[in-house]
Image: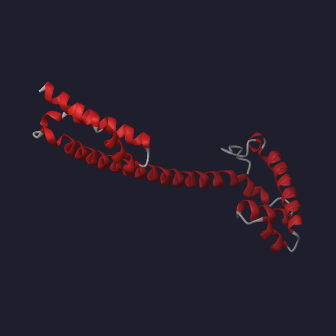
Amino acid sequence: MKRARDEAAAQLARERGRFLAFLEARLGSREEAEELLQAAYVKGLKSSETIKDREKVTAWFFQLLRNALTDHWRKKAAEGRAVNAFGAETARQEKLDSAKLDREVCKCVSALVGTIKPEYADAIRKVDLEDASVKDLAKTAGVSANSAAVRLHRARKTLKKRLIQTCGKCAEHGCRDCDCGKV
């Protein structure tokens, strides 16, 4: 039995170049081909005693390699599906977290935005709360894009001062987890 295994191992070792070329052509990577071939050698040597016709060791091993390739591609596909599912779940969670954060951050801002100059309040609402562009703000306000940008800058500066006056310390940290209860 040991002699039969040694003969099979010697024959498989002589065919290593053919096996490697076969795998590399199907995988497109020398490193992956080497890894798969080594794993197949281990599996093949463990079950080499089951070969009835010693003259068909090479054909038997090629079949083992084809099965290993099938398993490899199935595993890669499953990994791809898992990565895609994880990515989709992560994106969905980030969207939910972002929406929750927007609601939390905007409590004080939404309440105080009405206490500043109307054109400033309008700039904050459109650009920061409704996600309009500065160009859109300029168009609706009837001013140049540069003037709209300056107006938005002044509006944010004014609102920040008002937030700090009203909310204190929590405003300095972006009103996240605001617990001032003043608005």
Front position in the image: 159 or 36:
36
Q: Where is residue 169 in the image (x, y as percent from the top left)?
A: 76, 39
Q: Position of residue 141 (x, y in %)?
A: 84, 72
Q: Is residue 161 above or below residue 31?
A: below
Front position in the image: 2 or 86:
2
Q: Which residue is drawn at 38% across and 42% down?
A: 33
Q: Is residue 24 above or below residue 39?
A: below
In this picture the colour scheme is secondary structure
Query: Quadrant location of residue 116?
Result: bottom right
> Across the whole image, how many numbered discs are drawn on residues?
0
Query: Quadrant location of residue 115?
Result: bottom right
Q: Which residue is drawn at 78% across and 61% down?
A: 124
Query: Which image quadrant: the N terminus?
Result: top left
Q: Residue at x 85, y 56 (%)?
A: 153
Q: Is residue 139 above or below residue 154?
A: below
Judge left or right: residue 83 versus residue 64. right
Front position in the image: 33 or 142:
33
Q: Where is residue 144 in the image (x, y as percent from the top left)?
A: 88, 70
Q: Residue furthest top?
A: 2
Judge left or right: residue 85 versus residue 105. left
Judge left or right: residue 73 versus residue 99. left
Q: Position of residue 83 (x, y in %)?
A: 45, 49
Q: Which residue is drawn at 76% across and 65% down?
A: 133
